[in-house]
Image (cartoon, grey):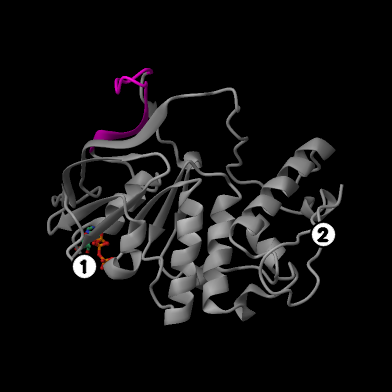
């Protein structure tokens, strides 16, 4: 099967077809199969309950009894002063560190607004995180290698590779990178396209929750507008939680917002615009 990418975005050079063969030389890290489509629910929320965090070996709590919930397919924004604990909270959500106390889970609710299942823990495989300045961490010589970095290298069956190829195509289409040749060096992309690539890397894993740490930082005005437009598009399909100082530019996307006070105390508050 050869999947040809086509669609929006100016075509700089003909894109490479994505085939199971072109995915055969990647390595495996934490790869998750998609949830069965038979699992239906009325709606679900990402919930943080009484989460506190004190780094190992220290006496100081960086987060104090944090509580919030974010319904699926909504956009949440956390703002607050530098050093208040925003990134620390994102790291807990992504499973990069463990709360000292409290829980982080997904809760499904029925039509009557009551939980209709036990909460499921939010495992790291269900979360995609794009750090500040993600382009600084690009490792590969071309776009295809960058998106598939960490994918299975062993000889899998054809069906599995077709499945990966479809995921890749979906992620690339989603962020509008389909006008870019997959053999292009990621470091030569514009600022906005580098951010699209960083998003595609996470979207290819089909996360339930996409976390963005300062998604507009370091971009010029045109790239910032471009990324905001893209996030508006992604929000239709995904649950997104961002930390940002760029409140005005992201305001039109925001469904829920919280202020992180110094000392790691989170409060639901409208954006101070
Ligand atoms: N492992 C650690 N041990 C001790 N202190 C830490 C540790 N990690 C972070 N801190 C401190 O915790 C506080 C919160 O840091 P954090 O990076 O979460 O803040 P932030 O709100 O994201 O800031 P910024 O907006 O500048 O990114 C800071 O004072 C930081 O120095």
- Whether residue 113 is in magenta: the answer is yes
Q: Disc 1, ligand 1: is the CB inside 8 Å?
A: yes
**Residue 126 or residue 95, whichever sits in front:** 126
Of the 4 image quadrants, the one containing the C terminus is bottom left
Q: Residue at x 64, y 65 (%)?
A: 177
* Residue 2 image position (x, y, % from top left): 85, 52
At mark 1, the secondary structure is: loop
Q: Quadrant of ligand 1?
A: bottom left
Mark earlier in primary sequence (1, 2):
2
In this figure, which residue is indicated by the disc labeled 2? 17
Residue drawn at point x = 76 percent, y = 38 percent: 160
Quarter assignment of residue 218: bottom left
Q: Return the x and y of residue 259 as percentages of the image width and height.
A: 18, 56
Side of 132 where 87 appears, left or right: left
**Number of numbered discs overlaid on the protein picture:** 2
Check residue 25 for magenta coloring: no
**Marking on residue 146:** none
As drawn, the label of residue 82 is: 1
Say which of marks 1 and 2 sits in front: 2
Residue 94 x, y percent position in the rendering = 40, 47
Q: Which residues are magenta?
A: 101-117
Q: Position of residue 116 (x, y in %)?
A: 37, 17
Q: CA distance from mark 1 to mark 2?
A: 44 Å
Image: 39 above or below 167: above
Residue drawn at x 48%, y 48% as measured from the top left: 236
Determine the residue positioned at 60% across, 27% down.
36
């Amino acid at each position: 099967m050869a999947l040809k990418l086509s669609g929006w975005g100016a075509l700089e050079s003909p894109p490479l077809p994505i085939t199971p063969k072109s995915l055969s030389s990647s390595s495996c890290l934490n790869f998750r199969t998609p949830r069965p489509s038979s699992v239906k629910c009325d709606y679900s929320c990402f919930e943080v309950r009484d989460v506190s965090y004190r780094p190992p070996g220290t006496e100081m709590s960086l987060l104090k009894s944090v509580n919030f919930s974010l319904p699926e397919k909504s956009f949440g924004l956390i703002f607050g002063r530098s050093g208040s604990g925003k990134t620390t909270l994102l790291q807990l959500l992504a499973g990069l560190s463990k709360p000292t106390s409290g829980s982080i889970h997904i809760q499904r609710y029925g039509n009557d607004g009551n939980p209709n299942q036990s909460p499921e823990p939010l495992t790291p495989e269900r979360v995609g995180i794009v750090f500040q300045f993600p382009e600084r961490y690009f490792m590969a010589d071309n776009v295809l290698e960058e998106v598939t970095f960490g994918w299975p290298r062993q000889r899998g069956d054809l069906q599995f590779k077709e499945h990966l190829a479809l995921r890749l195509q979906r992620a690339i289409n989603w962020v509008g990178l389909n006008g870019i040749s997959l053999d292009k060096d990621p470091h030569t992309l514009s600022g906005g396209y580098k951010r699209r690539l960083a998003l595609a890397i996470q979207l290819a894993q089909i996360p339930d929750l996409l976390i963005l740490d300062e998604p507009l930082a370091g971009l010029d005005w045109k790239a910032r507008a471009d990324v905001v437009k893209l996030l508006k598009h992604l929000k239709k399909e995904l649950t997104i939680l961002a930390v940002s100082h760029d409140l005005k530019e992201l305001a039109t996307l925001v469904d829920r917002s919280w202020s992180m006070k110094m000392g790691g105390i989170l409060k639901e508050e409208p954006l101070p615009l």
